[in-house]
Image: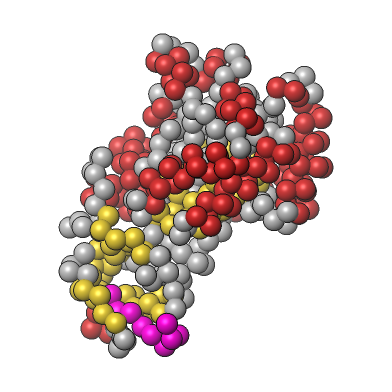
Amino acid sequence: MPKTHITFWRNARLMTCVGAGLGLIERGALATQAGRIVYAGPEAEAPRASTEVDCEGRWITPAFVDCHTHLVYGGDRAREFEMRLAGASYEEIARAGGGIVSTVAATRAASEDELVAQALRRLDALLAEGVAAVEIKSGYGLDTPSERKMLQAARCLAQARNVIVKTTFLGAHALPPEYKERRAAYVDLLADEMLPALAAEGLVDAVDGFCESIAFTPAEIVRVFDAARRLNLPVKLHAEQLSNLHGAALAASYGALSADHLEWLDADGAAAMAQAGTVAVLLPGAFYTLRETRLPPVAALRAAGATIAVATDSNPGTSPLTSLLTALNMAATLFHLTVDECLLGATRHAARALGLESEMGSLEPGKAAHFNLWDIERPAELVYRLGFNPLFRRVWSGA
């Protein structure tokens, strides 16, 4: 197709996600050229085009971004779900040898092809709801070969589907069984061997950790983050999910892309995140599955001026969720986010949490032409409905 070819998406309503709110435009139009947006605004002011697409009054939004997932893993944890129903807590399951460690055994035993095949089913569920970019964390291998296998599987997903995959190294997820009595040695392995080797192979886009009483201490996270800094890799952190270890403020001090979960975040942590530009990623799927009762401090995040995103946290144990639309409804219903906060949290703010804000997340000239057409009457329907997918068309690079 010649570079001068412009496609004109007319007779649309736009949710541009530009400006202070959703940037809604009635009687809008989008123009795309060579996989990029070249115009987004009133139809009357749109440029001439070689090809026209009549959107028949549908809403066009930026493609969705799921900025926190663990899509690649082996096995499942349905048995632990039954245990929780019988009254066992997350900590009790983890300390009894279940939780993350049980998924580690299944992941180590699976081949890369098996991991890809299993993850594709989960990824396809997200793509069917208009997701065009997804973060995939490692952290179920916990040794160099298995972490490599997970990250390579994540890279394969991006080759198999039209989707942007950002890979995050989460070696500091749990202590592997063989290091149960050798914490310091495992942290040394992460910082000095595992992360440098995987980064050198081009498998790591960012570095994460689980800062919690059942996982890693702030001092241990510092060791991992310092290693990431030496490798010029951005960081993010599972923080303040079960207690307040001030992990969010620690992450902010490293200029982290995001701090995620945050149920126990305090006002100082929220202020530190806002000042550093660290996105607060809320994960209602885990809150719901674990039957948590302490809400993330949304009011404090708003007061501090922090940026809020929403993600599925899709994982086998604590958020077996592969619907970002459902996560948006949960964020509104459980966390009391507004419709605007939910929709920005799955587009512009989620893109920022992955360092993709210059590429996607809003309908603006110069950004990739990844967007969705929806059979809805107003954007609030994307948050309001449960178990209903109104996606009419998922557009990738303008096609």
Q: Is residue 6 above or below residue 255?
A: below
| Residue depicted at x 39% and y 59% | 63
Residue segment shown in magenta: 1-9
Residue 174 at x, y percent in the picture: 65, 29
Residue 294 at x, y percent in the picture: 43, 27
Taking 364 as reference, is 54 left or right?
A: left
Main secondary structure along the magenta-highlighted residues: loop
| Residue depicted at x 57% and y 19% | 98
Among the 4 quarters of the image, the one containing residue 132: bottom left
Q: Going by the picture, which residue comes out furthest to the top?
A: 86
Question: Between 262 and 199, which is closer to the camera in this rendering?
Answer: 199
Taking 224 as reference, is 379 left or right?
A: left
Tell me, yes or no, whether the highlighted magenta stretch contains residue 4.
yes
Question: Between 368 and 331, which is closer to the camera in this rendering?
Answer: 368
Q: Is residue 270 visible?
A: no
| Residue depicted at x 60% and y 41% | 112
Among the 4 quarters of the image, the one containing residue 26: bottom left
Color theme of the render? secondary structure
